[in-house]
Amino acid sequence: MKAVICPVAPGEVTFTAIRAQGAGGQNVNKVSSAVHLRFSIPESSLPDGVKTRLLALGDQRITDEGVVVIKAQTSRSQEQNRAEAFERLQALVDSVATPPKRRKPTRPTAGSRLRRLEGKATRGQVKRLRGPVSGNE
């Protein structure tokens, strides 16, 4: 289990039980074991920076209104599906919890520039030698 960086409050999450898709026989047809998790980002108690980074994600699970919808249906147990959906939500929030580091602009060193130009000259020489041979006959 990974360390939780920015915990999601369980009271801010709503679960809806639905029937799972796919093969499974009578159990799938009778039991609502799949779970839809819904989590509203704008109405949550997450820090503002985390909210903006979550909303900026191009994730298909986030609607235009800022609601995260996660469907879990791998288990036959509704409780296990509920736990799995909550873990996936927490992983999504933790992925944007730490702000990205700003890039420090750097310049190539004189030695690296020289090595690059020497490599280019060597390749050019190899390609020139592949050309037609002109000589005295």
Image (tube, helix red, strand yellow):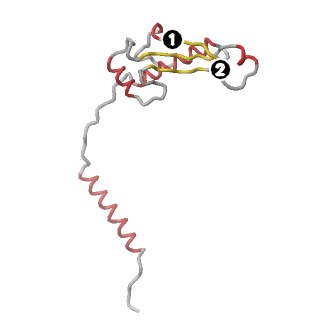
Judge by depth and name the residue closer to the eye, 104 or 9. Answer: 9
Residue at the location (60% across, 13% down)?
17
Numbered label attached to residue 20: 2
Q: Position of residue 88 (x, y in %)?
A: 51, 21
The residue tagged 1 is 14
Q: Residue furthest top?
A: 11
Residue at the location (26% across, 48% down)?
108
Numbered label attached to residue 85: none
- Asked if marks 2 and 1 touch (Cβ < 8 Å), the reply is no
Q: Which quarter shows the C terminus?
A: bottom left
What amino acid does circle 1 point to? Thr
Residue at the location (37% across, 14% down)?
46
Alpha carbon separation for disc pair 2 and 1: 18 Å
Q: Earlier in the sequence, mark 2 or mark 1?
A: 1
Q: Would you place residue 79 above or below residue 118 in this image?
A: above
Judge by depth and name the residue closer to the eye, 56 or 92. Answer: 56
Q: Quadrant of residue 85?
A: top right
Residue at the location (46% across, 7% down)?
11
Crowd band around label 2 with a 10 angstrom C-alpha radius: few (<14), some (14–19), many (20+): many
Judge by depth and name the residue closer to the eye, 87 or 25. Answer: 25
Classify residue 10 as left or right of residue 112.
right
Q: Which secondary structure, mark 1?
A: strand
Q: Residue furthest bottom?
A: 137
Q: Which secondary structure, mark 2?
A: loop
What amino acid does circle 2 point to? Ala
Q: Position of residue 78 (x, y in %)?
A: 63, 13
Q: Quadrant of residue 36?
A: top right
Q: Position of residue 43 (x, y in %)?
A: 39, 13
Q: Would you place residue 93 above or below residue 58 in this image?
A: above
Q: Position of residue 52 (x, y in %)?
A: 34, 23
Classify residue 34 as left or right of residue 115.
right
Judge by depth and name the residue closer to the eye, 4 or 39. Answer: 39
